[in-house]
Structures are given as C-alpha cells and as structure tokens.
Image: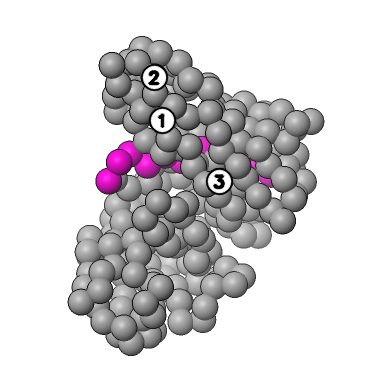
C-alpha cells in the first residue's frame, strides 16, 4: 500500500525549533519529488516547500523562506522539514504530499495524515 | 506568484443536486489545475488532475473542465458523502498555490 506517515509535531515556544518527518512506503520514494503543505486552524491549504527526487531543486514559500529547511533521505525513505525561528502564525497541521510525474501534471496524489504544530508560550 | 480564486466560498445544496464550483487563475496555467476534497480532520484527497482527468477510484459524478485561467468542478448528483470543502490548486508553477476553498454544506 502506498503510504505517507507524518510525525514530529508538538507544542513549541515562539522562536523555537521543531523537525517534522514523513515516512514513505509502498512506492519508489527516490523517484518522486515531495511537498510540504500546511493548514492553519480553520483556514485553507498553503503550500510550504518542494524538494526534487535528488534534492537538487528546492523551493520555499516566502512565508517560511530563511527559517525552514526541507531535506530527504532516500536510503531511509524519509522526508523532513526543519522549522526554526517559529512564530505563532506557523501554527498549523503540516502534511507531506507526493508529487506525481509530469504526465500527471505534477499533482499531489498521495498525502500524509498530517502532524500538528502549535507555536505558543 | 499565481493567485487562485474560487467561487463561491460556500454553497448550500441538497442530495441529488447538480453543483458547480469555479476557479480562476491570475495568469495562464494551461491545464495544470487540480481539485481536492477535504473532510474535517482529514487530509485532502485528489479528485481531478490536469483540469479534467478523474483520479482513479473517484466516482464519475465528479468532473472538471477548463483551460488557461478559468476552470470548473461539477458534481452531477450530490451524495451525502460529498459534503466537504473543495480546493483548486495550480501545478503550472512549482510555487504551488491553492484557492481559498469552497465549503459545500447540506441545505
């Protein structure tokens, strides 16, 4: 079964750090690009970051650029999001999502269940 | 960045109704337009990719159309399980962007 499992969320103080993980199974992880997407409480979906299959291409939303770092370990079938200098507005459920190939128009076809990050003192 | 605007923001309808949700892009995204369904407390689920291609396993009452900047998602005959929030999303730019969502509620 193709699956993504998100973990690592929790309560952190403003200015703190947190590292999210996404464990992939059931597919050739090393051939797929991946995204992180977040959803603040009661709000819509916001794309956060993209990483290509080889980690050669990385993009960030302006709202997290310079604070968040996306990475992956293809040997361990894992995706990560290192979140630094956290702010209250980073409070959200964070989802990892698989990017489908070009013939599927780069849609996000598989999603993790989400992990909740709360930034509060 | 490409801005995505959905309308309406909310919609009340009855089981069996035909409903249409509209999504407009701030610039041409060709057919790099996807639709997702999200239920409370759950991850988004892909319904339509490439503007009009039905994802495997998704009921045929869902359909998508459009190209360029204007797109629609249609549900031909609403079922109880279809009441949820729907999002459009462009994948033309790697700086992915979503519409603000359309909440479909039971009348």
- The N terminus of chain A appears in which quarter of the rendering? bottom right
For discs 3 and 2, the disc positioned in front in the rendered view: 2
Q: Pinpoint residue B11: horizontal percent, then vertical percent.
A: 22, 69
Q: CA distance from mark 1 to mark 3?
A: 15 Å
Q: CA distance from mark 1 to mark 2?
A: 8 Å
Q: Is residue A63 above or below residue B94?
A: above
> In this rendering, would A44 be left or right of B49?
left
What chain letter is assigned to the residue under label 3? Answer: A
User: In the image, is residue A41 part of the stretch drawn in magenta?
Assistant: yes
Q: CA distance from mark 3 to mark 2?
A: 22 Å
Q: Residue at x 75, y 31 (%)?
A: A76
> In this rendering, would A24 be left or right of B105?
right
Label 1 and label 3 in one chain:
yes
Contact, CB < 8 Å: mark 1 with mark 2?
A: yes
Q: Residue at x 49, y 42 (%)?
A: A114
Query: Which badge, 1 or 2, is on the more N-terminal residue?
Result: 2
User: In the image, is residue B14 part of the stretch drawn in magenta?
Assistant: no
Report which residue position mark 2 lands on. A12
Label 1 and label 2 in one chain:
yes
Viewer-side residue, B19 vs B89: B19
> What are the residue bounds of the magenta stretch?
A32-42
Report which residue position mark 1 lands on. A117
Viewer-side residue, A33 vs A37: A37
Q: Pinpoint residue B28: horizontal percent, then vertical percent.
A: 40, 56
Report which residue position mark 3 lands on. A112
Q: Is residue B81 above or below residue A121?
A: below
Q: Residue at x 65, y 60 (%)?
A: A103
Q: Pinpoint residue A69: horizontal percent, then vertical percent.
A: 53, 22
Q: Look at the numbered disc 3 and give the secondary structure of its residue.
A: loop
Q: Is residue A110 above or below residue B10?
A: above
């Amino acid at each position: 079964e193709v699956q993504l499992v998100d973990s690592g969320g929790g309560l952190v103080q403003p200015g703190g750090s947190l590292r999210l993980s996404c464990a992939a199974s059931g597919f050739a992880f090393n051939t797929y690009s991946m995204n992180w997407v977040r959803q603040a409480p009661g709000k819509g979906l916001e794309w956060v970051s993209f990483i290509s299959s080889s980690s050669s291409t990385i993009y960030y939303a302006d709202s997290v650029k310079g604070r968040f770092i996306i990475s992956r370990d293809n040997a361990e079938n894992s995706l990560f999001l290192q979140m630094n200098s956290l702010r209250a507005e980073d409070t959200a459920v964070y989802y990892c999502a698989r990017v489908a190939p070009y013939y599927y128009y780069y849609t996000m076809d598989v999603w993790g269940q989400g992990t909740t990050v709360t930034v509060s003192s | 960045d490409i801005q995505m605007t959905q309308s309406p923001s909310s919609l009340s309808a009855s089981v069996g109704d035909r409903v249409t949700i509209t999504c407009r892009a701030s610039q041409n995204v060709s057919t790099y337009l996807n639709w997702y369904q999200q239920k409370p407390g759950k991850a988004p689920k892909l319904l339509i990719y490439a503007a009009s291609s039905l994802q495997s396993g998704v009921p045929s009452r869902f359909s998508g159309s459009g190209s360029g900047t204007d797109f629609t998602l249609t549900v031909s005959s609403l079922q109880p399980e279809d009441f949820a929030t729907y999002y459009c999303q462009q994948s033309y730019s790697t700086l992915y962007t979503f519409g603000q969502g359309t909440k479909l509620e039971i009348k």
